[in-house]
Each structure stands twice: as structure tokens, then as C-alpha cells.
Image (spheres, rainbow, N blue to C red):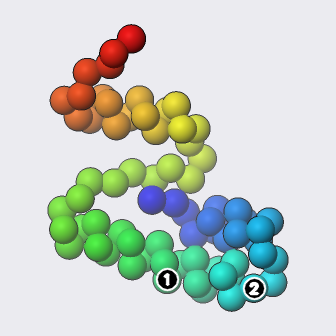
Amino acid sequence: SINPVRLQNIRDERRSNSDYASIDQCRKEVKLAEDMFVQNQVPFLDTSHTSIEEIAGRILNKSSIKRRY
């Protein structure tokens, strides 16, 4: 998941002053996604300020997937 403010900042760079980039829209979308994860018992983590390499490492550490290198 992502912090709604962080998502808003990213979207504002792409389409500033749009409904797509509004903080209300970002909050709504993040809440809907997180509610869906909880309802379906899908684990998730906050990746707001995390590199793709760190995200991959966290996923590998929490799963039974073994590193290939």
C-alpha cells in the first residue's frame, strides 16, 4: 500500500490540479484497496518510501520463496 499523501504527490507530478491527483481521491482509493486486502486476508505492506529492492527483500523474507543468487 502507499500513504495517500505520497500517492497524491506522485500523481500531482503527472496531472496536477486534477481529480485524479486530489488528496480526497487518493485517500478513497488507498482505503478501498486496503479494505479489499483485509477482507480477502491478503497481506500487504506500506511501500510509501521504500525502494523496489527493499520491497522485494521484504516479500522474500515473509514468504517461503528462496533467493536464486
Separation (CA) of disc 2 from disc 1: 15 Å
User: Label 2: few (<14), some or many (≥20) within 10 Å?
Assistant: few
**Mark linked to residue 20:** none
Q: Nearer the viewer, residue 35 or 67?
A: 67
Res 18 label: 2
Q: Is residue 6 above or below residue 28?
A: above
Label 2 vs 1, first from the N-terminus: 2
Which-is-in-front pick, marks 2 and 1?
A: 2
Could you tell me which residue is drawn at 66 percent across and 82 percent down? 20
How many marks the image carries: the answer is: 2
- Regarding mark 1 in the picture, which secondary structure is present there? helix
Q: Locate the C terminus by quadrant.
A: top left
Q: Which residue is mark 1?
A: 28
**Residue at the spot 38% in from the left edge and 34% down from the top edge:** 58
- 23 left or right of 31? right
In percent of width and height, residue 63 lies at: 23, 34
The reply to whether callout 2 and callout 1 are in contact (CB within 8 Å) is no
Q: Amino acid at mark 1?
A: Lys
- Position of 41 with respect to 55 (left or right) is left
Q: Is residue 11 left or right of residue 26?
A: right
Q: Residue furthest front?
A: 68
At x 45% / y 53%, what residue is drawn? 46
Disc 2 is placed on an element classified as loop
Q: Quadrant of the N terminus?
A: bottom left
Residue at image position (81%, 77%) is: 16
Hey, which quadrant is residue 17 in on the image? Answer: bottom right
The location of residue 9, given as percent across then percent down, is 72, 65
Q: Amino acid at mark 2?
A: Ser
Q: Residues within 10 Å of mark 1 (few under 14, many from 20)?
A: few
Residue 40 position, x and y percent, is: 18, 68
From this view, report whether residue 6 is shown above or below residue 59: below
